[in-house]
Image (cartoon, rainbow, N blue to C red):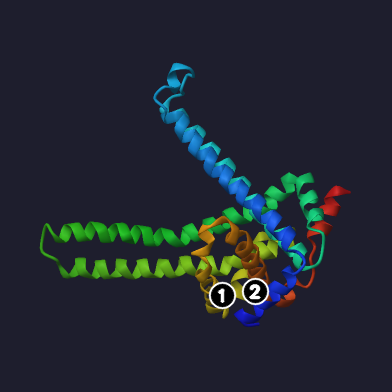
Amino acid sequence: MTNKQIKSYALIKLRGSWGNSIAITLTFLAIILLAILGSYLLHLFYNSPGISLFIAVPSKTLQITLSVIFHLAFYMIFIMIGYTFLREIIDIKNGRLFNTSRNRIMSYKKLFVKVSIIPHLVKLGVTFMCAIPGLLAFDAITSLTEKTYEKTLTLFVLLFFMMSVLIVLLSIYLVLNSIVCLHLLPVIIMHNPLIPLSQAISMSFKKAEGNRLRIISFHLSFLKYLPVCLFLYPIIIVFPYYVMSDLILVEDILGKELATDTFLDVFVEKEN
């Protein structure tokens, strides 16, 4: 399907379900705002001049430790909420009651942590591994640039500089490629929670082969909505529309790989 056909199909799937889509979008946005507010309040707590008069402020090391734990906890919650939102959109698309999936998720949080957090951490890990050579090469470029002001530029230094630039460009390509390819991973996991992670990652890269430009052009087509999303009311319409369209795109790319949806079956097995 073309981008235009995908967006038209998304509107058809959202027809009659806008109320539910807007409700879960508001919940998702509320979690984000709560995380931002909590982070800001924590910052004010530790930096308020008069707080030490009433409450013993912990040491700087303990402050940093608590802050890291606090932000990691919110980050994990944010990821789980994001995957829950995706699952609910999948149910809306398939004409199911999304409350069923949400209730199962709430009943088996430990299982859902494994289903959502671990794949997300793997995505970050793969992307970071692709970025490491570029970061090291960029540091080498910075050092070489400083040295050229101190002494004459030699042929060896010039070759090393050019090689470092090449590595940076290659690393940027690998990072972008991993982001685009692993974009398929959450949908695969939300359809088949028990699929081996290595198989899901392999499937993501395999199915994204030849569809990278299609995925990129699809997301670029939504950039025109960014200005209106600065306001609350448009974003609660645009966000579910974007997620539904993206879901249809990914399912179209995966094709027969998503012939069955075993999410509820997996959680029913755990329930029994």
The numbered dot on residue 41 is none
Q: Choose between 132 and 252: the one closer to the eye.
A: 252
Q: Earlier in the sequence, mark 2 or mark 1?
A: 1
Q: Is residue 141 above or below residue 33?
A: below
| Image mark for residue 218 | 1
Residue positioned 48% across, 38% down in the render:
40
Q: Closer to the camera, 272 or 87?
A: 87
Residue under the image location 73 percent in, 45 percent down: 109
Decide: few, some or many residues near mark 2? Use Cα within 10 Å; few <14, some 14-19, many ≥20.
Answer: many
Q: Tag 1: Cα neighbours inside 10 Å, few (<14), some, or many (≥20)?
A: many
Residue drawn where x is 79% and y is 66% of the image: 261
User: In this orientation, which residue lies closer to the viewer: 140 or 249?
Assistant: 249
**Percent x, y of residue 18:** 72, 63
Residue lying at 82% horizontally and 59% vertically, measured from the top left = 97
In the rendered image, is residue 195 in sight?
Answer: no
Q: Amino acid at mark 1?
A: Phe
Residue 185 placement: quadrant = bottom right
- Quadrant in the picture for residue 139: bottom left
> Would you say the residues marked 2 and 1 are in contact, meaning their CB atoms lie under 8 Å apart?
yes
Q: Tag 2's secondary structure? A: helix
Q: Residue 82 in the image: x percent, y percent?
A: 64, 54
Q: On the picture, is 206 further left or further right than 269?
A: left
Which residue occupies the extreme right position in the image? 272
| Image height of 255 relative to 126, above or below | below
The residue singled out by tag 2 in the image is 249
**SS of the residue under disc 1:** helix
Quadrant including the N terminus: bottom right
Could you tell me how far apart the alpha carbons at marks 2 and 1 are, in whole angstroms? 8 Å
269 lies left or right of 22? right
Residue 99 appears in view: yes
Is residue 34 placed above or below 53 in the rendered structure?
below
* Residue that lies at the very extreme toward the top in this rendered image: 53
